[in-house]
Image: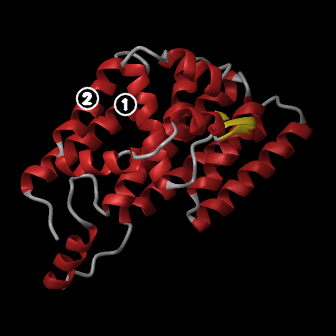
Amino acid sequence: MRYPETENIKIKTFFDACNEMIQGRFILSDIKISKILKAIANSEVLYNLFAEVLSDFKFKEEFENAKTSSKVNGGYFSVPENDEKVIALVFCILLEVDNQKMNLQTFVNDYFYSPEGYNISYSNFALSVLVPFKNAVLNILGCNEDGTLLEEEEEEVLEEDEEEEPNTREKILFANLTMSLNELLSVIMRSKINDEQKEELRIIIEAMFEAIELEHLTIINALTIPLEHMIGKNKQVKFYYNDFKECLVQFYYN
């Protein structure tokens, strides 16, 4: 089964709107949310998907369940593991913001606050809420971000007998992540941080290196929480940490 070309374009518009909000900052977020909601309404495939996952969905109950007593994934709010529930929950949050029943800035500050400023708080929100939302839609539709079904792509590869190296882009991103971590560790070891903290930071980063070898992004994301906390406002190290985080965010760009 293939989506009509017109649907491919509409699905791509949706993922472009998601990426725009993930990559951006709080500024003009109301417009970005409107783009996402409009893209859903304009696509028959997306509209049917969202109608299905929202059937019998209890927003208030699931929203309360998503609140956590300990910090997880950059904040005190963790989306469900089930793809259908992720889609329904995040859609309802975006709809509440669009209808001005929820203030996005307050929500981000309440559940994803970072002492490093609102941009980092927003980044925590994007990685913890928007990225799982986008990935859940991709998983259920079984397509890539331009609307092409993955089965269709595999068939084309077989037909053309292409033997391209799989996941080439991810390999490059993991290599970049490794280089940025090496630079970060080197700076930490040369900094004025006390020896005990240096050792703790080294252990965290070594664990990240192991997660990179496994290509396990969930573990890497989880380890950024204690890493960011320990680095704090150390200006000597912060620049290199931000470079590492930018490399990590690249995984979620199309």
> In the rendering, which numbered label is found on residue 85?
none
Q: Residue at x 56, y 46 (%)?
A: 180
Please identify the quadrant where the N terminus is shown. bottom left
Question: Is residue 30 toward the left or the right of residue 110 in the image?
Answer: left
- Cβ–Cβ under 8 Å for marks 2 and 1: yes
- Pick whichever, 166 or 78, lies toward us: 78
Q: Is residue 84 above or below residue 77?
A: below
| Residue holding disc 2 | 35
| Residue holding disc 1 | 21
Q: Residue at x 27, y 68 (%)?
A: 150
- Pick whichever, 170 or 236, lies toward us: 170
Q: Kindly state the secondary structure of the residue where label 1 is placed.
A: helix
Q: Residue at x 57, y 48 (%)?
A: 80
Q: Amino acid at mark 1?
A: Met
On the image, the x and y values in percent for residue 128 come to: 55, 40
Note whether residue 43 is visible.
Answer: yes
On the image, the x and y values in percent for residue 22 come to: 41, 34
How far apart are labels 2 and 1 at the CA level?
Answer: 10 Å
| Sooner in the amino-acid sequence: mark 2 or mark 1 | 1
Question: Is residue 172 toward the left or the right of residue 183 in the image?
Answer: left
